Image (cartoon, helix red, strand yellow):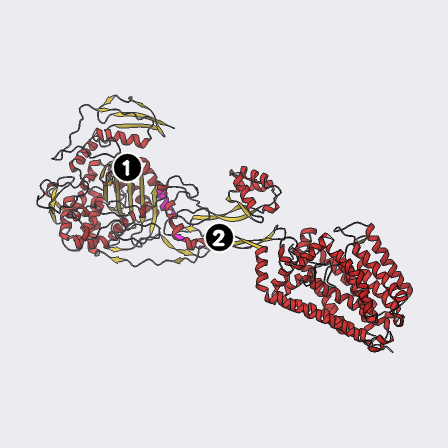
Amino acid sequence: MAKQVGIDKWMFASTLVLVALGVVMVFSASAVMAGERFGSPYHFLLRQLGWVLAGLAAMAVIMNIDYRRWKHPGIVFTLLGITTLLLVAVFFLDRSHNTHRWVKLGAMSFQPSELAKPALILFLAFFLENRTRMIDDWRHTLLPAVIPAALFAILIVKQPDLGTAIVCLGITAAIFYIAGVRLRYFAYAAIPLIPALYILLFHVGWRRDRMLAFLNPWADPQGKGFHIIQSLIAVGTGGLTGIGLMEGKQKLFYLPEPHTDFIYAVASEELGLIGAIIIVALFSIFAWRGFRTALRTRDTFGRYLATGITTMIVLQAFFNISVVLALLPTKGITLPFISYGGTSVFVMLASVGVLLNITQQTE
Amino acid sequence: MPKTRSANPNTRLYILAGFLFFWFLAICIRLVWVQVVDYAFFSKQALKQQQRSIEVSPVRGYIYDRNGNQLAGSMAVDSVFAVPSEIPDTHSTAGILARILRADATEIENRLNASHAFAWVARKVDNQTSSRIRALNLKGIYFQKESKRFYPKHELAAQVLGYVGLDDEGLGGIEREYESRLKGKPGTMLISMDAKRRWFGRVEKNPDLGENVVLTIDEKIQYIAERELEQAMHDTQAEAGTIIVQNPHTGEVLALANRPTFDPNVFRIPNVQALKNRAVSDVYEPGSTFKVVTLAAAIEEKLTNPDEVIDCQMGSIIVNGLRIHDHHPYGGLTVAQILQHSSDVGAIKIALRLGEERFDRYIRAFGFGSQTGIELPGETRGLTRPVSRWSKVSIGAISMGQEIGVSPVQLISMISTIANDGVYVPSRIVMGTTAPRSTAQLVAFHPMEGKRVISPMTAAQMKHMMENVVLNGTGKSAILNGYSTAGKTGTAQKTDPATGRYSKSHYIASFSGFAPVNNPAVTVLVVLDSPVGLHEGGQVAAPVFSRVAQQVLAYLNVTHDVDLQDPRWLLLRAKVKPEDVAEGAAEQIITIAEAGPPGQPEAPAAPPTSDARLMAAAYKQTAASQAPAPQPAETAGTVAPVAPVRANGTVVLDVAGGVVVPDFTGKPLRAALEEAQALGIELEVSGSGVARSQSPAAGSKIPHGGHVSVRFGR
């Protein structure tokens, strides 16, 4: 049925371009700060480069492994179990940046929440594949499918990392939607989620500040509105063609996390409107090819997997960019492929490897 | 559920993709909005928060002498600035800095508290201070190299070079005149700030260097002039003095020295008088030096010749009903002798031949009444009234250098005109400019065209007559060994600002001349303001001229044009008796003659009056004793009132009772000397500072010319 075709070159190329751009931007955004904090401007560049190479190697291997081989309870539940374990384990490990996000293994550190996203996708694709006919059976299908998602979301919110939690829920919703879950179930899900989100957003001091700042950043430009304004100043300064690679000023301690959450602001400042749109366009090409793959796969598992992985990457990318552009309130969320973060880029590339394998087996 | 499946399994995928597509569009619109529409707004915001630019003073161009010797340079010094946000405790930091800088701690603290990102702590501190601050390694205290003016030769040509203010702005002399060229363009220090208003780096736009200015001054000649002027100031206790050395053919000033002077390196200059460049800004009555103009004009107009004998009327002449006395009664003198003896009556009679209009034309042709154009600030035009405002006696007064104010540089230009065979060449002190960082490729300023004032023949005759002044007349002390010398003495009474009359004790003694006579290499002017004791130009200025010119000619390797004399002969010449060279300031005194026709209602106000004979008598006494001229006892003050004068012009001096010795204690040397001179006694001086003890004691009587020993101390 599914026949061997070449891998999707559009997807492959856009991924490589984004990753390459990411390495350059990580260096540009972090050089000064790394020089000051670690004594070497290459501190972040070298680490990112290492992870990218490892990620590309993983992608190259995985894209040659038939994606159906992942459809094995042993693999799915082991991955789910390990992820849960790690997500719980972070609470008993050292705090860094006042958060529990990292697991340190020797010299390497690892972010289990990044693993949670593909683990969830794999689980949902596996679990829902054979339940399409009873998709609206909430006791046998919906509830068991939602439990890992809800568990991950709660654990990740507790880290606290609301952004990644929202992405997890978004991926889950997208797969449920594609799987044909009736819309009213989404409404039912919203009943507990909306108050929870409200409490999380407005009753946790700093998130409340962020929300208020998002609604009117200029009310307190030196305080609550500072990050948003700095981000907009960075983007705005870029103009049409940008002020030149490495020339950005806003990364010099104005932007919070210039090499991670706000790397898109640095890119916009240095590369201008042209560069900024190219980046969004590359993610859009990725989305186009991802959904095209989902459409062309007769295999429901592959369809859910493709939808999940594409959504994971593009949703997170658009989410991040929207935060930078002050279209959404500030959330700690990274830009896939581009932001500094070893776990993220490795897991994302490995996931793209799976997706690329699916593209080889479309109609 | 089959319903959902069968409807269209792909619809929801399209909807999901469509949702993301609209999100994509929203992002693009937002990007255009922020990056294109609001670009200007955000750029402004960015600059506002990221940078502050602070001006860094440029490296000022250097000033060189004609041989490329540095007269003014710039050196890099540290300026201390603070990034107050990095300072843990501004109060204690300000205290520490204030102690090292000897400044007010509260003031520094206020400055530190005024800004988060930047504050100057001290500009241009010396190396010792900056290294002391550096050694403390204070948090938030940084150093910026700035350029500071320095003058390696200190007082040398101080008024020519001028000085600069704290920001290296030229405030006097060449520094001010060439400010725009020397200044260069200031650089900028960009203080970039981070989110916490911390300073984290700086980008500098280096300041552009200023152009260099090359002067016509020759450092060696300047040094000779400075040294000899210093010596003359010491010998004569004059209040002020000027020496100019000029190349008469090009108008280039080779040396220009003034006293009092200052060290331009010292920022606080105690004596404002020292800053004045008297050579260009002072106006004085030239006295009989001006007879050169009178005679040159008359000879040029063929109204007389050097050999014509003129009746000097035994020292008295009536000009337009006003009688003018000469300092010495002369009978018939040739024109040359008139200059030689500096006869006033002779000069007046020659001037009367010229007539007012023609005389005035020559005065202006010689450059009086207008700026010479020398490249120095504050040049005066002098005081030359138009003919329409001349009084009836003005022509007489001006013919002998009264009722006219000239600057030293105007006067030397006139003398140089004679030396330069009658062609007036504007004086200049700047040779040109060179580009930054190089002394090569001089952009020379072309000298202005000279203009002929008198014919070469007249000039030659004047030269010869002026040589005669040195050989046989009032300028004997100016003689040079191995060089023919020409010149003219001048002695003028200063106008007492308190009374508006001529002062009895303050003279301006001058000598101007050139050598060798036939092809002059240099013109030299020596002006001494208020010498104490001897005050005749021929007595005090001519020897200085001689010393300066002798050394300068030797330095310039000018070939001897007369035989070298035995030094002993020169020594003898140097001991010229004062009366031999006395032309007498008294010559310059005009009295209203009682013989004046009474029916002259419009008789103009004559210049301040006195009696010629008074002064003549004084010189006689001076000559007899080689001592300062005695003056009436009641004129002891430096600003002497008019002496008691009888109608017939003789003075009664009470010499019989001798002099009561005054109390000198507590007085400075100069005041003591003046007082002694006024009383007609001599001081034997030892030490320096103010008078501490004297012998004989105050109140005792000694004869005129007697000695009083005064010991000075600090």
How packed mark 2 is, by other alpha carbons closer than 10 Å (few <14, some 14-19, many 20 or more), is many
**Percent coordinates x, y for residue B339 in the rendering:** 18, 46
Residue B58: give its label: 2
Helix, strand or loop for disc 2: loop
In the rendered image, residue A310 lying in the magenta stretch gets the answer no
User: What is the chain letter for disc 1?
Assistant: B
Residue situated in front as seen by the camera: B273 or B217: B273
Residue situated in front as seen by the camera: B70 or B608: B608
- Could you tell whether A45 is left or right of B103 in the image? right
Is residue A229 placed above or below B117 in the rendered structure?
A: below
Which residues are the magenta region? Answer: B204-226
- Could you tell whether A326 is left or right of B575 in the image? right
- Could you tell whether A120 is left or right of B481 in the image? right
Query: Mark 1 belongs to which amino acid?
Result: Pro
How packed mark 1 is, by other alpha carbons closer than 10 Å (few <14, some 14-19, many 20 or more), is many
**Percent coordinates x, y for residue A152 in the rendering:** 83, 59
Residue B674 seen: yes
Helix, strand or loop for disc 1: loop
User: What is the chain letter for disc 2?
Assistant: B
Q: Quadrant of the N terminus of chain A?
A: bottom right
**Percent coordinates x, y for residue B344 in the rendering:** 16, 44
Query: Mark 2 belongs to which amino acid?
Result: Pro
Alpha carbon distance from label 2 to label 1: 44 Å
Q: From the image, state whether disc 2 or disc 1 is nearer to you.
A: 2
Residue under pointer 1: B531
**Percent coordinates x, y for residue A35 in the rendering:** 67, 53
